[in-house]
Image (tube, grey):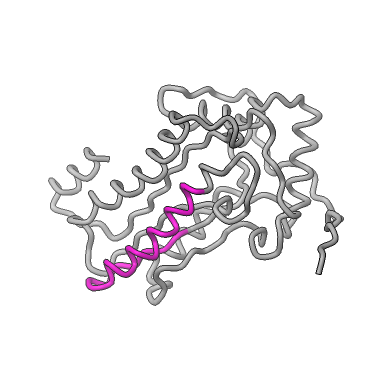
Amino acid sequence: MDRLYARVSQDGRLIDVVVANIGFGEFPGLADITEEHLDNILGINVKGTVFTVRKALPLLNDGASIVLVTSMASTSGQAGLSVYSASKAAVRSFARSWANELSGPGIRVNALAPGGTDTPAMDAALEASGLDAVARDQWRVEHSAAIPLRRPARPEEQAAAALVLASPESSYITGVELAADGGATQLGFGLVQDVPPGFGRGLVRTLVPGRRRRSRRPARTAYGPRSRRRPAMPARAG
């Protein structure tokens, strides 16, 4: 990041858009959280976001747009995601505060909260989860059925949502969080699907430099067949 900003400065250019898409995941339950886990998640997701944006400040044009990538996990209360969810909630808070701080020169700061997205990282995470192929496919089917639009997002759909926040078309929008999650956070995520045991190990290998592993599975276009049935909703008291 320092090299990138140095190159922009050397070329005498200014930046119109910064997208801080920083995400690292390990998902132990509360009883298994360690100081190392806490430091890893908060250090990468929170500290990484802060310094990606802070170091860009001298290079930003007036009227620039900053997009911080959060997650639907910050509001969904999924088991095993407590530290990851807290890190993304912190990023959401940055969007509010920085939108206020940077409003003088007309710089807008917004957040994008993706839901489940069909990526190689998701494939690798499921492969590392300890589930066999049948169980992984069943998890994909159940995951898709729990989303109101009945499928995960495609990466290009998340990119399009970020582009909306980055572009002049949203010139009067700042401090908001746009949920690109197929309606999951607003309409109920069936009500919440737990992540499989060991799920985070695949994300660690896929997303952390020096710990990459290429998945041998062919790319999927969706987690599984699209279900036409809504999952049964548990009765609520009151």
| 135 up-or-down from 76: above or below | above
Residue 112 in picture, x, y percent from top left: 49, 58
* Identity of the residue drawn at 63% across and 43% down: 118
What predominant SS class does the magenta segment belong to? Answer: helix
Tell whether position 94 is magenta: yes
Q: In which quarter of the image is residue 191?
A: bottom right
| 131 up-or-down from 157: above or below | above
* Identity of the residue drawn at 38% across and 58% down: 94
Tell whether position 103 is magenta: yes
For the C terminus, the quadrant is bottom right
Q: Which of 131 and 156 is in front in this view?
A: 131
Residue 138 in picture, x, y percent from top left: 80, 37
Q: Which of 101 and 80 is in front in this view?
A: 80
Residue 69 in picture, x, y percent from top left: 45, 52
Q: Quadrant of residue 150?
A: bottom right
Left or right: where does residue 200 sit relative to residue 52? right
Left or right: where does residue 119 sit relative to residue 69? right
* Identity of the residue drawn at 81% across and 63% down: 236
Write the start and end of the magenta stretch as one range.
Answer: 86-111
Left or right: where does residue 119 sit relative to residue 152? left
Left or right: where does residue 153 sit relative to residue 100? right
* Identity of the residue drawn at 51% across and 60% down: 161
| 53 up-or-down from 97: above or below | above
| 59 up-or-down from 237: above or below | above
